[in-house]
Image (cartoon, helix red, strand yellow):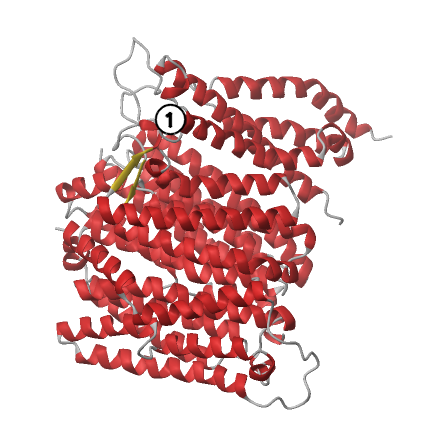
Amino acid sequence: MISQHLIILVVVIPLLASTLVALVRRPLFAWYMTLAVSLTEFVMAALLLQKTLVEKVISYPIGSWAPPLGIEYRVDALNAFVVMLIATIGAAIAIYAKRSVEREIAEENRSSYYALYLLCYTGLVGMAVTGDAFNIFVFMEIASLSSYVLIALGRNRRALYAAYQYLIIGTVGATFFVIGIGFLYLMTGTLNLADLAQRLPAVAGKAPVYVGLAFITVGLCLKLALFPLHLWLPNAYAFAPSVTTIFLAATATKVAIYLLLRFTFVVFGPSMAFHDLAFPAIWIALSVAGIFYGSVAAIFQDNVKRALAYSSVAQIGYITLGIGIATKTGLTGAVVHLFNHGIMKAALFMLLGSIALRAGAVMMSELPGLARRMPLTAIGIVIAGLSMVGVPGTVGFVSKWYLILASLEHGWWWLAALIVASSILSLIYMWRIIEAIYAKPEQNQQDKNGEPPLSMLAPSLVMVAACVYFGIDTRLPVSVAAIAAEMLLGAGR
Amino acid sequence: MHTLAAQFSNWGTVVLMMIGLYVVVARGNLIKKLVGLSIFQTSVYLLYIGPGKVLGGTAAIISPNFTVYSNPLPHVLILTAIVVGVATLALGLALVIRINAAYGSIEEDEIIEQERDE
Amino acid sequence: MMQREVIPRVVVKLLLPFILLFGLYVQFHGELGPGGGFQAGVIIAAAVILYGIVFGLSAAQTVVPKSLVTAMIPVGVLIYASVGVAGLLAGGNFLDYFVLDPDRVHGQERGIFWVEIGVLITVSGTMTSIYYAFASRPE
């Protein structure tokens, strides 16, 4: 019975937990609840992924109203993979969060923080599993509104203005998305994604459909921080509490990318998106611009979290580059990097959060001497950093390999060269950080504290190990990504 | 149906949308930005509800006297969107109050000045 | 004393029961006319807020305590989600109203009734909490 309702349980359980946490305003209960829910979600997401690999597509009508009249939750390899990513990061964060939240959030706000975290979790998973266009908007706003508050609870007062900026830009993006859905609804009369995919070819070529595609794409690009629509990201990630940064950096933009893939390939179809409009050129141009802008900006930051935030902008550029090269290899690279970047950034931000536990903010000037005080953390940062650069044996290499392969398949040598050049830029900013960590401290550091507590160190190192493990044994992510890419290209006309 | 007057709801949508977006982008006062955001969201409500009215249709309550009904689905969607808009506005205003307490100003350029000095 | 405040005080005192009654009317006629949980929630919250504006925040918080409205927010969501889970436990899908009653149409009515109650509680709690939060900041 449970396996039949897995799709809805992954959404409802965090929602119920969030209300319970909001009612019982005890921080310890809040953390236990979050831990229990995150671990349950991890198991359910794994079962869901397994079920999807067997059954190809799982459809679940809410309220037993048959689609396309009713709202339908629809899971295939692509979104089961995204849910698995969210659940994995969530499970690691739940173990990590206790000490980090105790340190960074005031006591009276802690239960609210966990309640909002669970709400954000609900929103992200809901966005991933639903098959109804307006339902996507509802969950998108649930996730966004809770993430605005999660960011605003940061210690630095700059978190408030960063949250406000994100609110304005994010709401404009969500409203653009709704406008696009509105045009689609007016042209076809349905909101169900699968039904839209069937009805759109009949009205293809008319202006409102293209307007709808444009609005949806721009709205989603505002959410996934494609250059030049990334302005909210650096400050939001830099000044938010550590747990927020880990969660949002690893999952929020990925779900928006999943939605972009779903709309571009399944609903509209590659022929409309890529042939009628000049999408490949726009995607590739903006992605390359984003990669270089993000990497160069990351080199010049003093705040390490902000440098990694700019690096996120660059990494998202890689994913959209794979989308722009819309071949099977390109899309496999994009989907695999969706997962890989999630675990890489989760590892890096977790390790940074452990450093921040003792020190507060993480500035470049505070890094020297870290390697001696926290050797394991330092090694973790080195390995995760190598993964960001794309050293063979790490996950970063796998994604870049597919992207370079995809560019060469098209005969675009210049693009492959650009990808390699950008890796050198990431090497520069990661090297800057690593060099600072292993440098000798100038004066004696005031707190000669050691490694972060085990509850924080263990999940971080598990994530770092995942970076290496999935770089060597690439079967699981790559096979699921390949199935997803095949499905995306095959669904189109 | 192609006269200017007949399409007034579409014109209203476009005018409100542009006014809202302009205010969000061009005004530096944080509260004015939120007002512009609200105006922008209102235009979206018009976008959905205007075409939802079926000419000659009555309210969407089943009655033996009528055969043509207006489409009730856009109304439900917009109810959700209105709730989301209200929540966003409330959240934005709460943030502005906190920003005012932390920075002493609600003008964007003054806040950026203070952040630059940090 | 405060001559000009007499009119609002008297009028609000007379109007409040009608506002609350109208809110309840809107709540229960959601399926027959414009209305439903959200509209009714806002009307009821408006009644409390009106009382708070005219008679003072402390008077309003004596009648509707802050802890109550803060608790109302998750309780409404819990009621809504519980109706969904009840559908699951009774053998249908999530938010399946058909299985809530042997007669399928009555099941729909039951389900809608309870979810609208949930929406009413959450919306009125949220609106009143927002008012309390903004109004109680020291100026």
Kind of residue sitting beneath label 1: Asp
Residue at coordinates 57% horizontally, 45% vertically from top-left? B90
Residue at coordinates 33% horizontally, 77% vertically from top-left? A390
The residue that mark 1 highlights is: C96
* Chain ID at mark 1: C
Query: Is residue A288 at least partly visible in the picture?
Result: yes
- Quarter of the picture holding the C terminus of chain B: bottom right
From the viewer's perspective, tell me whether residue C100 is left or right of residue A350. left
Q: From what the image shows, is residue A377 above or below residue A339?
A: below
- Quarter of the picture holding the N terminus of chain B: top left
Residue A230 percent coordinates (x, y): 41, 65
Q: From what the image shows, is residue B73 above or below residue A399?
A: above
Q: From what the image shows, is residue B79 above or below residue B62?
A: below
At label 1, counting other C-alpha atoms closer than 10 Å, the crowd grade (few under 14, some 14-19, many 20 or more) is: many
Query: Is residue A216 at least partly visible in the picture?
Result: no
From the viewer's perspective, tell me whether residue C6 is left or right of residue A54. right
